[in-house]
């Protein structure tokens, strides 16, 4: 399976990327499954497996937004191993579960 982004979608992703991210040639991908700390991704290059970039997620506890299934993320593709996930792109919608202890 492979995602072919239309020109409009490509523009949408480019607008959300910083100049440094564009220069680093990060690519958008969609999270299609999560297994513990491994993320299964689908992007223009097809399916791949990704891991979180440590400095972007683990060194900022409480501030990091971890990817969930359906999220779009910016990745650095890696032909020799796992892709590296740099950040989660803003979500358009989300299902939020109410805290069971609060009514």
Image (cartoon, rainbow, N blue to C red):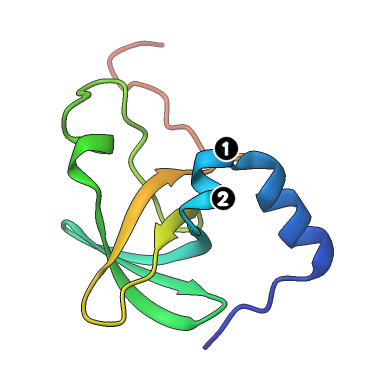
Q: Residue at x 35, y 11 (%)?
A: 102
Whole-number angstrom distance, CA of label 2 to CA of label 1? 6 Å
Residue hosting label 1: 18
Of residues 97 and 87, which is closer to you in this image?
87
Q: Look at the numbered disc 1 and give the secondary structure of its residue.
A: loop
In the figure, is residue 54 to the left or right of 25? Answer: left
Q: Is residue 64 above or below residue 89?
A: above
Q: Is residue 33 above or below residue 46?
A: above
Residue at the extreme bottom of the image, as rendered:
1
In the image, residue 7 lies at what x, y percent? 82, 67
Q: Look at the numbered disc 2 and give the secondary structure of its residue.
A: helix
Q: Residue at x 47, y 32 (%)?
A: 96
Residue at the extreme right of the image, as rendered:
8
Circle 2 crowding by C-alpha within 10 Å: few under 14, some 14–19, many from 20: few
Residue hosting label 2: 22
Residues under numbered marks 2 and 1 in contact, where contact means CB atoms less than 8 Å apart: yes
Circle 1 crowding by C-alpha within 10 Å: few under 14, some 14–19, many from 20: few
Residue 94 visible somewhere in the drawing: no
Q: Is residue 70 above or below residue 83?
A: above
């Amino acid at each position: 399976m492979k995602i072919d982004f239309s020109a409009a979608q490509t523009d949408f992703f480019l607008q959300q990327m910083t100049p440094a991210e564009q220069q680093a040639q990060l690519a958008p991908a969609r999270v299609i499954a999560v297994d513990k700390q491994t993320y299964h991704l689908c992007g223009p290059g097809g399916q791949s497996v990704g891991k979180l970039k440590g400095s972007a997620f683990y060194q900022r506890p409480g501030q990091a937004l971890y990817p969930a299934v359906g999220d779009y993320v910016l990745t650095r593709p890696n032909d020799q191993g796992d892709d590296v996930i740099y950040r989660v792109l803003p979500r358009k919608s989300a299902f939020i579960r109410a805290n069971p202890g609060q009514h």
